[in-house]
Image (cartoon, helix red, strand yellow):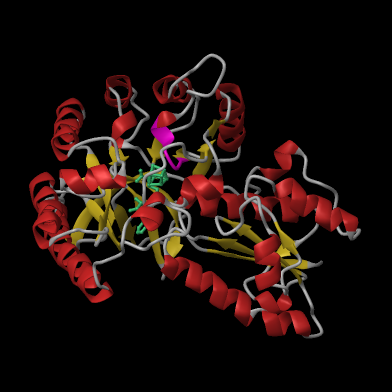
Amino acid sequence: MPCYYIWTIGCQMNKADSERIGSYLERVGFQATRRAEEAEIVVLNSCVVRQSAEDRVINKLGALKSLKRGPQNPILALTGCMVDSRVDGLRNRFSQVDLFFRPQAVGELGQFLGSRGLAAPPKPDSLLPLHPSPSTFVPIIEGCDKFCSYCIVPYRRGRERSRSVDEILCEVRWLVERGVKEVTLLGQNVDSYGHDLPTRPDLADLLAELNRVDSLARIRFLTSHPKDMGERLIEAMAQLEKVCEYLSLPFQAGDDDILLAMRRGYSAKQYRELVERIRDAIPGVALSTDVIVGFPGESEEQFERTLDMICELRFDTVHAACYSPRPGTIATRKLRDDVPLEEKRRRREKIEVLQERIASEINRKLLGQTVEILVEGRKKGKWLGRTRTNKLVFFGDEGDHLGKLVRVEIEKTSPWAFQGSLAG
Ligand code: SAM
Ligand code: SF4
């Protein structure tokens, strides 16, 4: 049987897209391999949100050149955010690539394989995950309309396009029939879901529909934009029993002038008030956030406002990134990247050290407690799963627990994960 190999970097959206591309390839007769050398078709799913990610894609493309020249000579396809609607530039730079396709156009991969007599084009349902994990991603809105000044996503993923409530419901029911217990609804800006649909449903409406799906145990969604996180959604989270107490809500910067230059559309005070409302409505909610350090013009004092916000709001997780100028974005066109890389790295490390302390304090409180987790798989001889608040828990046991909700007593904590044993 011919083999395919997919290499993925970037966000959950890319992981979900890769899973779907793999499912299509399996349905038309290919088999997965972990080694590019064994594959007839190699797909790279790229990320260009930061230069460091783009560099990794370029290195991978370089490394695959020799494979293309060798006897195996696989078909090499590039997708993800590196591919926009104009591929001529890419074609000139990466002549080893046979096909460039945008992630939302897997049909082009099918047509290409069809033109070589290798496969039939994908039918709509051939992209559904073939071996879904008990916890599965479901993209519900593509693209982004926000145009934050630093971000390349709207240029590469295009404008927001929501899938209909019916289509998502059908897909989730189909997944549940195959053992899925938890879905994570995905969008770059998931809480703006629905505004482009004829009847204008919102994320709260969609959550209410999904909450009624029998045998589905949990629902999550990410990533939320603070500006779109309205009262209806907070209320839905608080009231719908399947919606988990977990929110990914990036604030990006703690200083108002930087937030303005980033074009985020809220102030630090508004973000603080939003968090207060969320915590009042949803007791025990876990919060994750993203921040960017070294945005053009960011002074030490302005950076410290980001640190203050982290200290004060005590997030469960913080992803800190060094600002990276991206071609075509407003920040790159209008602002000078004037914070030296060393200084950006120092600021990022300061956040990481602070957050490690905060997360270890938050997590230590779970020591000795019993938590419910959904078992997603095994790693290094242990079962692993997540709490409703998205805490990663490992436990050892000989039984088969995959896809089950089990109770685990926490015996060891760290800033990143927990160890425990099955509760009696
Ligand atoms: N839509 C989400 C939001 O509103 O923040 C996040 C999606 S974005 C693709 C993922 C993360 O990448 C952002 O939260 C931001 O911290 C980071 N990011 C995006 N552009 C960046 C840039 N030019 N430099 C550094 N980090 C960046
Ligand atoms: Fe990028 Fe801003 Fe859209 Fe998030 S909301 S994807 S950071 S433009």
Which is more toward the observer, 294 or 132? 294
Q: Eyeballing the image, is 352 above or below 218?
A: below
Residue 25 located left or right of residue 19: right
**Residue 58 quadrant:** bottom right
Q: Is 42 or 380 nearer to us in this picture?
A: 42
Of residues 77 and 342, which is closer to you in this image? 342
Residue at image point 21% right, 55% down: 410
Q: Position of residue 335 (x, y in %)?
A: 32, 57
Q: Nearer the viewer, residue 85 or 117?
A: 85
Q: Is 131 above or below relative to 327?
A: above
Estimate the x, y position of residue 9 in percent, counting from the top left.
50, 63
Ligand 2 rendered quadrant: top left
What stretch of residues is rendered in magenta?
Answer: 187-191
Quadrant of the snapshot with the N terminus: bottom right
Residue 367 visible in the shown view: no
Is residue 284 at all visible to an observer of this figure?
yes
* Residue 165 within the magenta-colored segment of the rendering: no
